[in-house]
């Protein structure tokens, strides 16, 4: 089968190649899937550099999430040939086939395409775990989402709006502002260049935000600490800026807010029942048409480099989806 293999860890993707490798063999407990769509996540890019917290030893097949059709599964596993499924396994998604543990898959909600399903899983479960599960998002609250053009951030904006929140999307790429306005339901789109606390204060009538969802870190995190209200939550989602911010502990004390560490995948592994409930809630919202992932482009896997480079160069507004069979 065709698969995107990381042969060595490099900064410039030179250690990555599209290779012909043997098809996976299904082990007991696993489900064999033909992959129709697989979406690119920031950790996929980091893993080609050895810069993600999970560091698989090369060679490994890239791709942490996919959607496809079941070919073979154990009787009683909950899956049968022909079922439409979505899921992932940290690696192995950018390939024509994958064999993964049944617990790592779920059925695709009705009316959702393979591309949408592949683009939804990690982004929406991250957004849901952070906003709803950990911070108890309520209708009417103000939410600030930074790195607004990213896959996870657009999911957070979409989900927060679906649940009745008021959303400020903040981007560090001013040229993307109009595209974010067009592709998201954010109430306001602002720039994270320089100091934006005054802008957030003006929009919220001085109240500031109940929740800040920050996948960027660095200077954006620093300024975001000034945008969260007393009693609010600042969610640490990631560090796309490349700098892990530091904060003096007297700041959350004096300002009375909480800093919330988010690890969505780990949360679902620690609390499997909650993980399943989160998936079910997302599926219900998707089936009802209340949420829908923003997809920047769908590419054949042969054009993998274009997708990875667009992410590295910060060109995207939404997800990249690869089609391995094309
Ligand atoms: N905590 C968790 O459980 C969890 C789960 C999944 C992912 N994540 C993390 O979430 C983050 C986003 O992932 P993603 O897949 O959404 O990535 P993505 O689609 O590439 O989006 C990242 C966004 O961050 C901003 N950005 C990128 N490079 C930057 C830079 N050098 N300086 C400042 N801002 C930059 C850009 O937004 P603008 O141009 O609009 O500013 C970009 O669109 C990653 O750090 C990932 O590891 C965390």
Image (cartoon, rainbow, N blue to C red):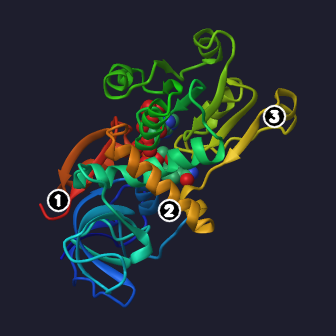
* Label 1: which secondary element: helix
Q: Is residue 326 found left or right of 204 in the rendered image?
A: left
Q: Residue 227 is drawn in which quadrant?
A: top right
* Distance Cα–Cα, label 1 vs label 2: 34 Å
Say which of marks 1 and 2 sits in front: 2
* Distance Cα–Cα, label 3 vs label 2: 32 Å
Q: Position of residue 221 (x, y in %)?
A: 64, 34
* Label 2: which secondary element: helix
Label 2 near ligand 1 (CB < 8 Å)? no
The residue wearing badge 1 is 302
Tally of numbered discs: 3
The residue wearing badge 3 is 252
The answer to which of 277 and 297 lies nearer the viewer is 277
Position of residue 189 relative to residue 50, above or below, is above
Residue 76 seen in the current view: yes
Find out whether the residues at labels 1 and 2 contact each other: C-beta distance under 8 Å.
no
Quadrant in the picture for the C terminus: bottom left
Residue 195 seen in the current view: no
At label 1, counting other C-alpha atoms closer than 10 Å, the crowd grade (few under 14, some 14-19, many 20 or more) is: some
Q: Earlier in the sequence, mark 1 or mark 3?
A: 3
The answer to which of 74 and 304 lies nearer the viewer is 74
Position of residue 320 relative to residue 59, above or below, is above
The residue wearing badge 2 is 276
* Label 3: which secondary element: helix
Q: Is residue 200 found left or right of 34 in the rendered image?
A: right
The answer to which of 115 and 45 lies nearer the viewer is 115
Quadrant in the picture for the N terminus: bottom left
Q: Earlier in the sequence, mark 3 or mark 2?
A: 3
């Amino acid at each position: 089968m065709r698969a995107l293999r990381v042969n060595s860890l490099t900064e410039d993707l030179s250690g990555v190649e599209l290779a012909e490798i043997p098809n996976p063999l299904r082990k007991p407990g696993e489900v064999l899937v033909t992959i129709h769509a697989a979406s690119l996540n920031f950790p996929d890019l980091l893993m080609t550099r050895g810069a993600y917290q999970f560091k698989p030893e090369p060679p490994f097949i890239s791709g942490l999430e996919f959607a496809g059709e079941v070919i073979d599964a154990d009787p009683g596993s909950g899956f049968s040939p022909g079922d439409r499924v979505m899921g992932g396994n940290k690696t192995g998604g950018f390939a024509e086939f994958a064999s993964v543990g049944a617990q790592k898959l779920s059925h695709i909600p009705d009316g959702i395409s393979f591309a949408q399903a592949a683009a939804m899983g990690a982004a929406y479960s991250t957004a849901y775990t952070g906003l709803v599960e950990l911070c108890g998002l309520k209708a009417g609250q103000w939410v600030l989402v930074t790195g607004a053009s990213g896959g996870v951030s657009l999911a957070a904006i979409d989900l927060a709006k679906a649940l009745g929140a008021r959303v400020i999307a903040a981007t560090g790429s001013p040229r993307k502002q109009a595209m974010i306005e067009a592709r998201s339901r954010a109430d306001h789109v602002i720039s994270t260049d320089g100091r934006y606390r005054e802008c957030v204060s003006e929009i919220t009538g001085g109240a500031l935000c109940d929740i800040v969802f920050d996948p960027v870190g660095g200077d954006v995190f620093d300024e975001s600490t000034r945008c969260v209200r007393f009693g609010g939550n600042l969610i640490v989602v990631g560090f796309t800026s490349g700098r892990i911010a530091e904060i003096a502990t007297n700041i959350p004390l004096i300002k009375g807010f909480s800093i919330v560490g988010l690890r969505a995948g780990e949360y679902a592994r620690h609390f499997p029942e909650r993980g399943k409930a989160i998936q079910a809630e997302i599926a219900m919202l998707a089936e009802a048409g209340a949420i829908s992932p923003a997809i920047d482009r769908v590419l054949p896997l042969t054009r993998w480099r274009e997708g990875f480079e667009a992410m590295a160069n910060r060109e995207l507004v939404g997800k990249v989806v690869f089609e391995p069979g094309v």
